[in-house]
Amino acid sequence: MLRCHGVPGALTACFPAPLQPAAVTNGGCRRGASTSVGPARIFDTPEELLADIGEPCRDNPQTLVFLHGVRFAPNVGASLRASHLLGAQGCLLAGGLAESRQRRPSPLEEAIRISMAARHGWPLRVSSCALPDSAGAVKVCAEHGYLPVCVENDTAGLANPPLPAEDLDLTVPGMAFVFGAEDTGVPFEVAEACAQFISIPCRGKGSLNISHAVALVLYERGRQLRADARTRLLE
């Protein structure tokens, strides 16, 4: 079933309904290509995550959040929460917190706990890759129909200055938003694999918490998708 919140009933074919929790067992049991942590699933590879989500199309837009080098479980957990509530279908983590999976609970499992997914039954989808594979993972997203968009204030000469998020068309059926750690940002080779660049205009110097940046970008995408749906309804 497809539905959309906050718009007339005739627009319900434009947005996917929230995922229903999978019948999984708490605490890390194997299930196919993923590991279950409560209602969340951690996929072994980005390809398996993308295959589980399915192909995006105009009547079923899909959104990915790509976090590069984010090291702290509270930041990742809050980003996972914002991603789910604002319509992203999956999160891909490169390096940072995702590289420490030996101890139990792992930092990634701790981030999922902080996200409140277990309490609310949110069926998060998460995958990870090593830092050296980050640019390749962005290209994999593009090959699966997701436009990779780097969220940065500076493109380091790769492209024209990034557009404010509201000035770029964010109604593309498949979009993957790439965010970097607050202190290091998105590295050159990963930004180079992106097709578009956007920024979040701020009045002061400094950086937003990563989860705030995720929430603002996803809200703007949702706003544009709802406006596009209304326009198409009137055509």
Image: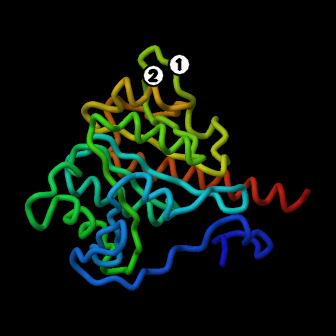
x then y, percent, for residue 161: 52, 21
Task: Relative to 132, say whether 220 is above or below.
Answer: below
Q: Which residue is mark 1?
A: 159
Residue at 51% of width from left, 74% of height from top?
19
- Residue 31 picture location, percent across and down: 33, 75
Q: Position of residue 74 (x, y in %)?
A: 23, 57
Is disc 2 surrounded by few (<14), some (14 to 19) or many (20+) residues within 10 Å?
many
Colour pattern of the rendering: rainbow
Hey, which quadrant is residue 231 in on the image? bottom right
Dots 2, 1 in contact, CB < 8 A: yes
* Left or right relative to 231: residue 97: left
207 or 70, nearer to the observer: 70
Q: Secondary structure at mark 1?
A: loop
Look at the picture and state if 176 lies above or below 78.
above
Q: Report the side of 219 relative to 40 (left or right).
A: right
Query: What kind of residue is marked 2?
Result: Thr
Name the disc covering residue 47, or none. Answer: none
Q: What's the amino acid at mark 1?
A: Ala
Residue at 54% of width from left, 54% of height from top?
63
Would you name the residue on which mark 2 appears?
Answer: 155
